[in-house]
Amino acid sequence: MSSGTVTARTAPGVTVPPPSLLARALPAFSGTTGLLIKVVLLGVTNAIGLYAGVKLLADEAVVAGAVVLAATVAIDAVYILSSRVVVPLKFLVPATVFLIGFQLIPIVYNGGVAFSNWSTGHNLTKEEAIQTIQETSLAQPPDGAFYTMTPSRRDGTLTLLLVAEGSTTALAGDEEGLTELAPGDVTIENGTITAAEGYDVLTGSELVGIDQELASLVIPAGGDTFVRAEGLSTAIELTPTLRYDEENDTFTNIETGVVFSDNGSGSYATADGEEIEQGWRTNIGLENFREIVRNPLIRDPFLSTFAWTFTYALLSVALTFFAGLFLAIALNHDGLRLQKLQRSILILPFAVPAFLSILVWRGLLNDDFGVVNSILPVDVPWLFDPFWAKVSCLLVNVWLGIPYMFLVSTGALQAIPDEMKEAARVDGASGLQVFRKITLPLLLVAVAPLLIASFAFNFNNFNGVYFLTEGGPYGEDQSVAGSTDLLVTYTFKVAFQTGRGGDYGLAAALSIVIFLIIAVIAAISFSRTKTLENLN
């Protein structure tokens, strides 16, 4: 044996197991390889941090930009320095970054939205809203001119080639205004410009997809007159119906003289409360929360939906737990034939994505061609009657939840010592007494926290209701919340499916209320389950 070889000594008769795959792989990431990996990862982190910081500073988000840049420098310091003080930080930094990115920032952002009027029609800055109001207030006057129009581009800029009705003068219009073209530079056929020197006329496939660009192009034509395209071949003269007074920050209806001023809630409104449709995003304090309490169109559906949500979550947990526990007890006997096969069959629903299973059940429960009604002697309106729709939601959710409760209960049952049950039987306890006094209490010690978590999950079980009934059926007195809507689906509809668009601020406020409700219920439940700790 050479002097440079080191061998491990073991006691006689002791076999040393070979190193694991992980133990053999770790040295490959040390030394030069590990250094290169660290340099690459730090380089990517610095590139992302520098880009984000500069972008935020350019957008005048000074505080956010400074925080991002400072955090990037701090990460570099942690992973470059070798001091014993920073060693724990090497492990804490990734977790902290993900915690901030995926938990704290969304929570803070949602809270900010809840105190704003952000909604459809209130999603711009005030300056953008003023510009939009000025553009949308344009209307064709009784004696307004008509133009034949040809879309074209000059140096990549969309330009309209125009000929006024009854005129032979050729004009080119863009965001800067109208320019008269020399007669010798244009070709006009049947009153329409077909070619112009210095302009690329758009034809065929070049016209596909420019509708929105055409609609947003408003051409100043002098004074209070503007020109805008109508379709792909005509344009019309427009004049404003509202005039903006920058000094007083008001809009005035030119025809009626009615004045619209800033109402402090992100809109221009009259003294009688009439608002211009387009507004801007602004902070409105607790107004969204007051709306939940005061507005019957929001409060009444919220309360009825909350009652059904609580019932749905409670019954789902109770039914799935007792059904899963019953099956777990039935299949927990030693020597049971085909025990593993039966357990595997019971957890099959758990192996299929829930939303796919729900969509399958939606087809099975369909009134017209569903398999369930074809088997039953009567036709049950599973999805179209308020009562039966709720029953359907519960049945499908219980079917999906039984495998989970079965697995949990099986594991908890196997952890209960058989000696305790045998001792109870020796003392003369019946099977039901053994279950009530020993099995169930010891089972709840392990399962109670999971039941609370399951309740919180079902309280916000979006897929379980939306994919099956979409919250319906709907009553005549409600336009947003349906008979089977949970608070989470009701909030979703407030955010994206209300009559006039989405009310994101109100939806964010509702989400905070839902969080507080679940937090209170969970806190009470955990305090009650502390009594089970004495069973240990």
Image (cartoon, grey):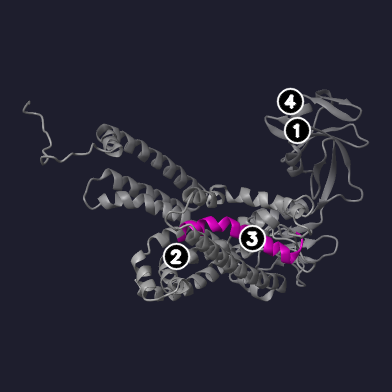
Q: Residue at x 82, y 60 (%)?
A: 254
Q: Are marks 2 and 1 in contact (CB under 8 Å)?
A: no
Mark 2: few, some, or many residues within 10 Å (few <14, many ≥20)? Answer: some
**Position in image of residue 347 (x %, y %):** 52, 51
Question: Which quadrant is home to the C terminus?
Answer: bottom left
Q: CA distance from mark 1 to mark 3?
A: 50 Å
* Residue at the disc numbered 2: 447
Mark 1: few, some, or many residues within 10 Å (few <14, many ≥20)? Answer: few
The quarter holding residue 45 reads top left
Q: Main secondary structure of the magenta part?
A: helix
Q: Amino acid at mark 4?
A: Gly
Q: Are marks 4 and 3 in contact (CB under 8 Å)?
A: no
Residue 88 is left or right of residue 112, and the answer is left
* Residue at the disc numbered 3: 395
Mark 4: few, some, or many residues within 10 Å (few <14, many ≥20)? Answer: few
Q: Are marks 4 and 2 in contact (CB under 8 Å)?
A: no
* Residue at the disc numbered 4: 198
Q: In the displayed structure, would residue 481 be above or below residue 338?
A: below
Residues rendered magenta in the picture: 384-409
Q: Amino acid at mark 3?
A: Leu
